[in-house]
Amino acid sequence: MVKMNDVAKRANVSKATVSRVLRNPETVKKATRDKVLAIIEQLNYQPNILARHFRRSETNTILVVVPNIMNTVFSHILGGIEYAAGENGYRVLLANTNQQVEKEYEYLDHLKQRQVDGMILLSARMDRGIIAEVMKQYPVVLTADYLEGIAIPTVSIDNVSSARTATEHLIKLGHSRVAHITGPLHLLVSQDRLKGYRQALLQNNLDVDNILIQEGDFSHESGYNQMTKLLALEHPPTAVFSANDEMATGVIKAAKVYGLSVPEDLAVVGFDNIKLSAIYDPGITTIAQPMFEMGKKATELLLHQITGVEMTKRQYVLENELIIRDSCGAKLLNDD
């Protein structure tokens, strides 16, 4: 009996390439695809469909692709995924890309070779066309991020309205010179939080001053570095909306280094409500994402696809909440 390995050797390609030709030919270069298909015909290779189905039905494993396992937000979402998976008899295989998009493509092979039953993406940096093709053939869900124009099942929050709420909170406290430290602007979530910030200023008749907008990378260090730039301005901001809590801790550290007091001299609002935001000094006012629930709902949607349950809804936007602490002078708001 001719095996896939025989085809791979004759065509001088890997078994994974032969598998891609059979399952997703559009992902293989035409010359390679034609060569492999010719060898398959010459050898009269017959894929063992029954064996593939058996392997798939026995995996009871889902793949979770994470851009950075050190990010606390992702670890909380993973907690919800692992809980829901365990409740349904599934294991979780974790794939950490370390922000390298090429690794996302590598991890796709686990799905295409039926080593896992489905995949949850915690970011969407791959080519949109490839994601669109993959989701037509395999169970895939996206959470903590979203894609426009692709009907992939998604669990997220409304980043525009939540960022608008965070910025409006600072404006209501009397601040008119409000800065924003964004996340990486190639990410839609960062773009949406910037959009919400801009909306809040314009809706309150405040000018959008681009010099008050600095791009960070969601790290403590970038929050510190971008805040030092803002404090060096001739007219520095009196308030800052940080696109996540880790950068907010960097903002507060920079303020203290410059001899400023938070919130008396600088008001700060973060985003995510990670555990650190509650124990930091001062406690950070922030937007709380329902991270654990996002993981649970994403797993639920994925298992519906795997088990053939009809989905009446594919896009879920979960509720968020403004958590008021000491970093932006909440008492002033309460006294109004």
Image (tube, helix red, strand yellow):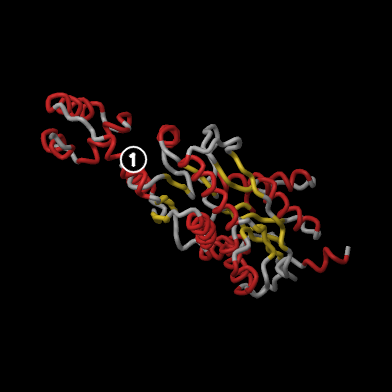
Quadrant where the N terminus is found in the figure: top left
Q: Which residue is mark 1?
A: 112
- The residue type indicated by label 1 comes to Lys
Residue 261 appears left or right of 107: right
Q: Is residue 86 above or below residue 127?
A: below
In the rendered image, the residue lying farthest to the right is 336
For the point 60% across and 37% down, which residue is it? 313
- Foreground of the two, 11 or 262: 11
Q: Is residue 236 visible?
A: no
Q: How many marks?
A: 1
- Foreground of the two, 273 or 36: 36
Q: Position of residue 143 (x, y in %)?
A: 53, 48
For the point 58% across and 64% down, which residue is it? 228
Q: Position of residue 195 (x, y in %)?
A: 65, 44
Quadrant where the C terminus is found in the figure: bottom right
Q: Is residue 211 visible?
A: yes
For the point 48% across and 37% down, which residue is it? 308
